[in-house]
Image (cartoon, rainbow, N blue to C red):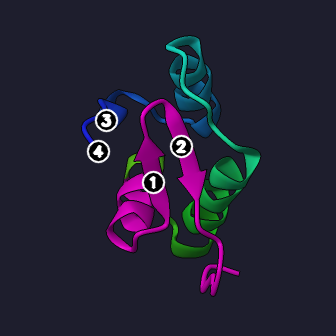
């Protein structure tokens, strides 16, 4: 995934900017990021990388998806 996520501190800022570029961002992805940030005391960028490395965030064309199955975050 080659997105410039490092310039965002808040999930909502990233989501709004990403949606403005024509991407679909599901609520479940934002929720997963929020849980990771809170549970592991991570920044937005750290949480995004954490979930990406664990194959929880996917990007297909302009559509993000989030795999919450077997979610160890909760």
Residue visible at 63% across and 87% down in the picture: 70
Alpha-carbon distance for marks 4 and 3? Answer: 13 Å
Task: Name the residue beneath numbered marker 2.
Answer: 64
Which of the labelled discs sits on residue 1, or is there none?
4
Please tell me which residue is depicted at 60% across the width and 86% down the height of the picture: 72
The quadrant holding residue 22 is top right
Q: Is residue 1 magenta?
A: no
Q: Earlier in the sequence, mark 1 or mark 2?
A: 1
What is the crowding at mark 3: few (fewer than 14 residues within 10 Å), some, or many (at least 20)? few
Circle 4 residues within 10 Å: few <14, some 14–19, many ≥20: few
> Closer to the observer: label 1 or label 3?
1
Residue 50 in the image: state x and y as whole percent: 39, 66
In this rendering, does residue 15 appear at all?
Answer: yes
State if disc 2 and disc 4 touch (CB < 8 Å): no
Q: Is residue 14 left or right of residue 60?
A: right
Range of magenta residues: 46-74
Q: Secondary structure at mark 2?
A: strand
Spatial separation of the CA atoms under disc 3 and disc 2? 17 Å
Q: Is residue 43 visible?
A: no
Mark found first going from the N terminus, 4 or 3: 4
Q: Which residue is mark 3?
A: 6
């Amino acid at each position: 995934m080659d997105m410039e996520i490092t310039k965002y501190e808040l999930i909502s800022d990233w989501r709004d900017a990403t949606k403005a570029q024509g991407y679909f961002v599901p609520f479940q992805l934002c929720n997963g990021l929020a849980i990771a940030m809170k549970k592991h005391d991570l920044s937005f960028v750290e949480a995004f990388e954490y979930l990406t490395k664990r194959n929880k965030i996917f990007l297909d064309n302009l559509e993000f998806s989030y795999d919450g199955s077997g979610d160890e975050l909760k």
